Image: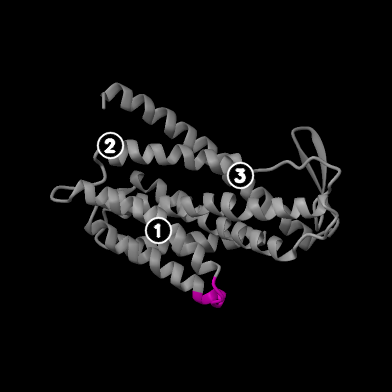
Amino acid sequence: MNYTLSEILNLIFRWTHVFAAIMWVGATYYFTWLDRRFHTTDPDEVWMVHSGGFYVVRKQSQPSAAHTLHWFKWEAAITWLSGIPLLILVYYVGGAIIETGQNKAAAIGIGVGVLIGGWIVYNLLWNSPLPEMVKLLISFAALVALGWWLPQVMSARAAYLHVGALLGTAMAANVWDVILPAQRKMVAAVRAGNPPDARLADRAKTRSKHNTYMVIPTVAIMISNHAPVNTYSHEYSWLILAAILVVGGLVAHIIRKQ
């Protein structure tokens, strides 16, 4: 690909990806904070002030058939849809996916397989009847195992990036394949005059909770190329990845409790 064209596309995709991610993360933690306020203060409404205006938000157990619903979904879609072309441009086309002696075609195939297969395994695992702690430990072990194995078949930088891209893919798929369909079914039930299925709300909330825990490690992994010595280039990069996952999860847990 022409170098000038590549740089222009890189700028467009990267700016779009970062800005959409800012909006997505902001919306995610805004609603996380808002939901927490309903459990710790007034259970009926939350008062807020911003930019010279005062706002009152009330939480409902089911949607209203008489009001317009505002869906927060495009931030997730645009983040993923701009991130994948950027991944292809920099790593698959640009060649950053491999180091000397590694097979580019194999690395690309593995990278694509990680993104698709990782989501399938994650979704099946968390739909299974296993105890939550068991599913959590399996998920953590699988990510750390990927962090150890991927540098054997692709560059260390690409290995870290693909773990982050897997988390981002799971987050976007949670929104579009789990959360939104559940919410649409609940809205349809109310409009048909039927009570919404509480199990759908629980499932959507669980995946939304997952996203709040995954987003901080994902951002840390995605910016690891700014600190290569202490991340993917380190001798024990997979252990550092494990630490990023743990610390990121703990930070998210603290934020969720505020």
Q: Residue 85 carries which label?
A: none
Residue 139, how many percent across, how many down? 45, 67
Residue 185, how many percent across, how many down? 71, 54
- Magenta residues span 128-134
Location of the N terminus (image quadrant): top left
Distance from disc 1 to disc 3, alpha carbons, whole Å, reads 28 Å
Q: Residue 26 carries which label?
A: 3
Q: In this view, does 64 lie to the left or right of 224?
A: right
Q: Which mark is residue 117?
A: 1
Please state which amino acid type lies under the numbered disc 3. Answer: Gly
Residue 229 makes an appearance in the image: no
Q: Is residue 228 left or right of residue 100?
A: right
**Dot 1 lies on which element?**
helix
Residue 244, how many percent across, how many down? 42, 59
Frontmost residue, 211 versus 114: 114
Residue 109, how many percent across, how many down? 29, 51
* Residue at the far front in the pictured view: 192
Please state which amino acid type lies under the numbered disc 2. Answer: Val
